[in-house]
Image (cartoon, rainbow, N blue to C red):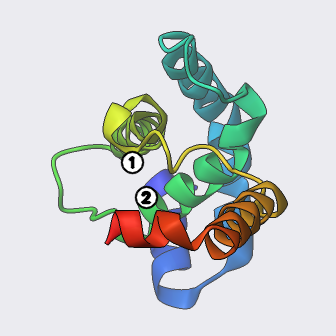
């Protein structure tokens, strides 16, 4: 069967074997595109295995949104969408504007510091008056 027939079967009749067949067919290409894109960005705090779920969802969305009447083949459409999804995901970790969101801080450490500071202010009322 051709790709367009399998995509049609999945989009209209929701047949899982069509999806699984196309996933297996394009899996090596998806892995190759992911590796090439990941290799370009060496400074991000991610590993290649972090992209496995993104690969699956990108392929899933490609199958859901592909139109046979478009001028692209499914292979080209899927490759372009995968590259775009990977770059958007990587951009989150490169952007300096959201660098605080990319790392976790222990709640216990933060909580201990605030209680120490609050207890110090309660014990020393002159600091409260000085701040006001």
Residue 77 left/right relative to 109: left
Element type at marker 2? helix
Query: Would you say the residues marked 2 and 1 are in contact, meaning their CB atoms lie under 8 Å apart?
Result: yes
Looking at the image, the residue that sits furthest to the front is: 126
> Which residue appears at 47% of the width and 43% of the height?
89
Whether 15 is drawn above or below 88: the answer is: below
Residue 59 left/right relative to 45: left
Image coordinates of residue 98 in percent, x first then y, are 39, 45
The residue labelled by disc 1 is: 74
Image coordinates of residue 84 in percent, x first then y, are 35, 40
- Residue 70 versus residue 101: which sits nearer the camera? 101
> Which residue appears at 77% of the width and 34% of the height?
49
> Which residue appears at 69% of the width and 53% of the height?
53
Q: Which of marks 2 and 1 is nearer the N terminus?
A: 2
In the image, which disc is placed on residue 62? 2
> Which residue appears at 51% of the width and 54% of the height?
58
């Amino acid at each position: 069967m051709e790709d367009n027939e399998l995509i049609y079967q999945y989009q209209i009749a929701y047949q899982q074997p069509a999806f699984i067949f196309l996933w297996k067919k394009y899996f090596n290409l998806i892995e190759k595109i992911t590796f090439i894109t990941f290799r370009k960005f060496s400074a991000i705090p991610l590993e290649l295995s972090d992209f496995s779920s993104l690969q699956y969802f990108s392929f899933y969305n490609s199958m859901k949104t592909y139109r046979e009447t478009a001028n692209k083949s499914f292979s080209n459409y899927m490759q372009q969408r995968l590259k775009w999804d990977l770059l958007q995901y990587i951009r989150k970790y490169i952007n300096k504007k959201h660098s605080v969101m990319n790392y976790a801080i222990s709640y216990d450490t933060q909580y201990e510091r605030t209680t120490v500071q609050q207890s110090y202010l309660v014990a020393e009322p002159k600091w409260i008056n000085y701040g006001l």
